[in-house]
Amino acid sequence: MKILSAQQMREADQYTIANEPIASIDLMERASKAFFDAIKPRLKKNNPIHVFCGMGNNGGDGLAIARMLIHAGYKAQVYKVLHSDKASEDFIINEKRLTKMRRAQYAELSETDILPSLSSADVVIDALFGSGLNRPLEGFAARLVQHINKSGARVLSVDLPSGLFADDNTSNKPEHIIKADYTFTFQLPKLSFLFPENEFFVGNWQVLDIGLDKNFIDQQPSDWHFLQPEELSTLFHSRSRFSHKGNFGHALLFAGSLGKAGAAVLAGKACLRMGAGLLTVHVPACNYSILQSTLPEAMVSVDSEQHFVSETGDISPYSAIGTGPGLGREPQTANALKLLIQNSRCPMVLDADALNILAENPTWLSFLPAGSILTPHVKEFERLTGKSANGWERLQKAREFAFRYGCYVVLKGAFSAVVGPDKKVVFNSTGNPGLATGGTGDVLTGMILGLLAQGYTPRFSAMAGVLLHGLAADLAVRRIPMESLMAGDVVSFIDRALKKVII
């Protein structure tokens, strides 16, 4: 699913109007009906509803939604917020339709008026400003937004919370943005929904299909994509009846240290669950018996050091290499990682302490094998690139980093972002907060490694690994409380996740 700019979405509206064809007012009606149908399950007939409408097309949506609410028997007070001297044409049409209704409670609200009383028992439908907004709210509009936010009312926003920009909000004023409980956005998600600093404003969000022309959307250029499970289903290789383990790659996992054998076990299990034909895990001597007893399907290569990894051995037989889980940061380990990076002729997956070692030795980044995949969480990425003011700035740094070093960066978190050397970004749609527990990053490393080993491209391996990792967690929490989810549970549901995605 593409993510388009506000301008591209306006062009999609106009193209649909001209080529479906459909009148602009009827497209507004269709969008408003989709919103009305989505919010009905969240409303009770006795809920006092306040609909605040700006004077543009977002406000026109609000007027149409109010009309539908009143027609369905809900009690809705509608406010025309006079923030401009001129209303849009479709706003005016919907205003006339609403005011013809006998039960319509409609009032104008200007800067000199006392703002309406709101309480936590009320529902507010926010239809003040849409995606056309390009500067922070000020004056009367900002005062109204603050009034709604302080009221404790449940807020449902039309398309996006009023005051929030569709993409970069670095220059915005957070105190002048609606704090929605739910946002129902039209056709495609907005880029700003995917940054952690905006969760406070967007709340829970849902995309509503309003029938914009899909061919037009498909033809639009975009650096942003919101990945859905069905988009991967036809991209997995089918297995021949005469396949053997040699057809599916030999992965090397360079992991573990004293007290951290579990990370190597989790990553190794995940790698094999993803379908790698062979796996060798290189660990320090103290981890040997643990790996042999808990992961009998893997071969174990034992380092000469007892408590940490210090050597690479012959890496020529391997089709993909993963490193970082439980690795530690001993000087000898760092030297071994340097040799691994310099000598590898296949793409690598780097996580955890491998990233921390690179942060301490940034000149080594230039030697990363082409197409390598780095999987940092926020703090690990900060160590590599410095602090960022917000999610938008962090993403821009990741794009520049991936471009500079010819690698892929997986920025882990809600809506994990896969950033490629071409600066294009794919956001993941799966996963839940149960993944916020130790070891789940090791599982992701193993999953991506398992795909790389089979010959999938780095781009596909990163995207599919992240999506299936989140999907496994989503399937797990259907049976396990989110608070109880452990990394091992994610491994246990990889097979179910694959079964859901692969045709």
Image (cartoon, rainbow, N blue to C red):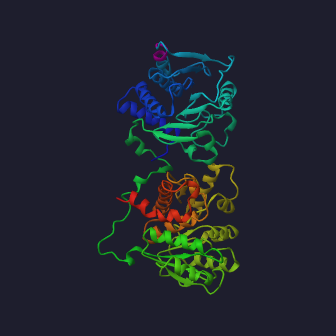
Q: Which residues are magenta?
A: 96-100
Q: Quadrant of residue 153?
A: top right
Task: Please report the residue visible at 67 percent of the width from the left and 40 percent of the height from the top.
Answer: 171
Decide which of 77, 223 is in the foreground and name it: 77
Image height of 185 relative to 455, above or below: above
Decide which of 300, 45 is in the foreground and name it: 45
Q: Position of residue 219 (x, y in %)?
A: 41, 45
Q: Position of residue 89 (x, y in %)?
A: 48, 21
Q: Position of residue 370 (x, y in %)?
A: 52, 68
Q: Residue furthest bottom?
A: 304
Task: Please report the residue visible at 54 percent of the width from the left and 37 percent of the height from the top.
Answer: 183
Q: Quadrant of residue 353?
A: bottom right
Q: Is residue 407 visible?
A: no
Compared across the picture, whether 143 is left or right of 351 comes to right
Q: Is residue 417 within the magenta segment?
A: no
Task: Please report the residue visible at 33 percent of the width from the left and 69 percent of the height from the top.
Answer: 239
